[in-house]
């Protein structure tokens, strides 16, 4: 098997490359900056036009980095009849562009696996500069998220490539739903600097986040106060090991 890894320099892609190489699987990476290549055969280019990179590969680790499905049909037609493991979102269940990307993939191959993630633990890195001062000011500290370690996403993908996971949709989460305030405390503990959450007024948060992003993000975080993100056992079921905790992630990053 020869696997094309898109998003190869990203949070999950670099771990997918390493895992595939460790498993002695032939890897090709599609990157825009050749200097950042994590290994494998290099093709420099863009995910919106992956035809050259897709030539001669059997499978694709697919990351679509845009918040729109515009251009997706052109991109995925290069992957016709190949095995595709797509890093999707739990939000695809409710429709929107994530669902449109999944549907586009279904039209070019019957050998697909969708990894629907709730969110990556790495998304909390934006809090680190504030955490180092001892206080993180942001909205909805009691919103509870089941963020997943990027290595677990990579492990799921490698299992999807090497096992029989065709036409499977997996919900990929961490092992528990933690409040954002608790996540900040854990980051502070790993940094060696106690950190606390300070609730930010919504008007201030909207200005800081930008109106377009705030329009979707703030209502979603508000919903998680009383209705936490789900916790799935799919990581353990597919990989054979329990999902790594947010504490694990923080200690690896900062200790």
Image (spheres, helix red, strand yellow):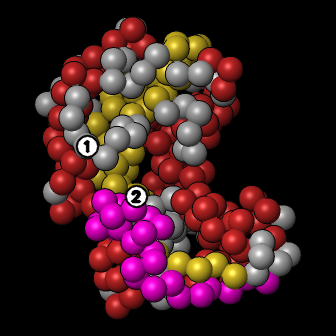
Residue 104: quarter of image = top left
Q: Main secondary structure of the magenta part?
A: helix
Q: Magenta stretch: residue 119 in it?
A: no
Q: Is residue 184 above or below residue 62?
A: below
Q: Which residue is mark 1?
A: 68
Label 1 or label 2, whichever comes before in sequence order: 1
Q: Is residue 8 above or below residue 147?
A: above
Q: CA distance from mark 1 to mark 2?
A: 17 Å
x and y percent of residue 42 in the render?
58, 14
x and y percent of residue 53 in the render?
43, 13
Q: Magenta stretch: residue 199 in it?
A: yes
Describe the element under mark 1 as helix, strand or loop.
loop
Residue 62: quarter of image = top left
Q: Dot 1, crowdedness within 10 Å: few (<14), some or many (≥20)?
A: few
x and y percent of residue 63 in the render?
40, 37
The C terminus - image quarter: bottom right
Direction from residue 96 to residue 26 in the image, left or right: right
Of 251 and 44, nearer the camera is 44
- Tell me which residue sits at (69%, 72%) in the image: 130
Q: Is residue 202 above or below residue 98?
A: below
Q: Dot 2, crowdedness within 10 Å: few (<14), some or many (≥20)?
A: many
Mark 1–mark 2 contact, CB under 8 Å? no
Residue 244: quarter of image = bottom right
x and y percent of residue 240 in the render?
54, 57
- Tell me which residue sits at (76%, 66%) in the image: 251
Q: Which residue is mark 2?
A: 117
Q: Is residue 104 visible?
A: yes
Q: Is residue 244 visible?
A: no
Describe the element under mark 2 as helix, strand or loop.
strand
Direction from residue 241 to residue 214 in the image, left or right: left
Span shown in magenta: 194-217
């Amino acid at each position: 098997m020869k696997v094309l890894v898109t998003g190869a320099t990203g949070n999950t892609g670099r771990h997918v490359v390493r895992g595939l190489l460790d498993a002695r699987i032939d890897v090709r990476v599609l990157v825009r900056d050749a200097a950042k290549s994590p290994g494998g055969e290099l093709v420099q280019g863009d995910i919106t036009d992956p035809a050259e990179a897709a030539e001669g590969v059997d499978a694709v680790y697919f990351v679509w980095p845009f918040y729109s499905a515009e251009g997706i049909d052109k991109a995925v037609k290069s992957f016709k009849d190949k095995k595709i493991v797509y890093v999707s979102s739990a939000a695809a269940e409710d429709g929107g562009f994530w669902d449109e990307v999944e549907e586009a993939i279904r039209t070019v191959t019957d050998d697909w696996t969708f990894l629907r993630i709730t969110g990556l633990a790495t998304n909390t890195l934006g809090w680190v500069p504030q955490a180092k001062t001892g206080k993180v000011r942001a909205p909805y500290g009691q919103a509870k998220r089941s963020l997943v370690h990027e290595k677990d996403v990579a492990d799921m993908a490698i299992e999807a490539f090497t096992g029989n996971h065709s036409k499977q949709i997996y919900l990929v989460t961490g092992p528990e739903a933690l409040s954002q305030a608790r996540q900040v405390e854990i980051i502070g503990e790993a940094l060696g600097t106690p950190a606390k959450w300070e609730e930010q007024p919504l008007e201030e948060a909207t200005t800081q986040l930008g109106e377009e992003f705030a329009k979707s993000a703030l209502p979603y975080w508000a919903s998680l106060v009383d209705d936490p993100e789900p916790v799935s056992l799919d990581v353990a079921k597919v990989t054979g090991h329990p999902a790594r905790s947010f504490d694990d992630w923080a200690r690896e990053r900062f200790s």
